[in-house]
């Protein structure tokens, strides 16, 4: 990770976040989920919400593509993405 010149997990958690929350619903490929984690880490996204049958960490395929970002990006799993969106809208008002 030092060769990639990445921040440590703790540095990432303390960094100012981009006020964007990615919501992934029913993503079949755990590799794609890991890719979103890596992208969220690179752009310092606020959070990822996983929903439906989308794979969640810890998962070997997520770990393989996320390259550690599953530890530095805040995430949560919810049953229903629509409920999560409605909750987030109320929170932001």
Image (tube, rainbow, N blue to C red):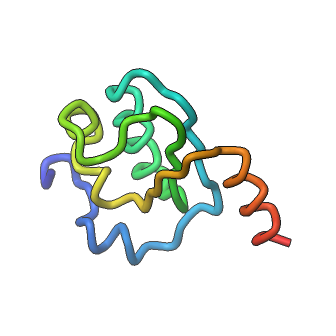
* Outermost residue, right side: 93
Q: Position of residue 73 (x, y in %)?
A: 39, 58
Q: Position of residue 69 (x, y in %)?
A: 31, 50
Q: Is residue 55 left or right of residue 3?
A: right
**Does residue 60 lie above or below 83 as drawn?**
above
Q: Position of residue 39 (x, y in %)?
A: 44, 42
Q: Is residue 31 left or right of residue 91?
A: left
Q: Quadrant of the C terminus?
A: bottom right
**Does residue 75 lie above or below 36 as drawn?**
below
Give the camera-side residue of 34 and 89: 89
Quadrant location of residue 36?
top left
Give the camera-side residue of 76 and 73: 76
* Outermost residue, front side: 79
At a point 61% along the width and 54% down the height, the residue shown is: 21
At a point 42% along the width and 49% down the height, the residue shown is: 42
**Does residue 16 lie above or below 52 as drawn?**
below
At a point 39% along the width and 77% down the height, the residue shown is: 14
Q: Is residue 35 left or right of residue 24?
A: left
Number of numbered tags placed on the structure image: 0
**Does residue 53 lie above or below 74 as drawn?**
above
Q: Position of residue 68 (x, y in %)?
A: 23, 50
């Amino acid at each position: 990770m030092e060769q990639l010149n990445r921040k440590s997990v703790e540095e990432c958690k303390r960094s100012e976040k981009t006020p964007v929350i990615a919501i992934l619903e029913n993503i079949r490929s755990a590799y794609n989920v890991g890719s979103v984690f890596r992208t969220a880490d690179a752009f310092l996204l606020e959070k990822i919400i996983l929903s439906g049958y989308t794979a969640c960490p810890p998962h070997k395929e997520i770990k393989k593509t996320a390259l550690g970002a599953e530890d530095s990006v805040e995430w949560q799993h919810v049953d229903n993405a629509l409920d999560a969106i409605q909750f987030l809208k109320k929170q932001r008002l």
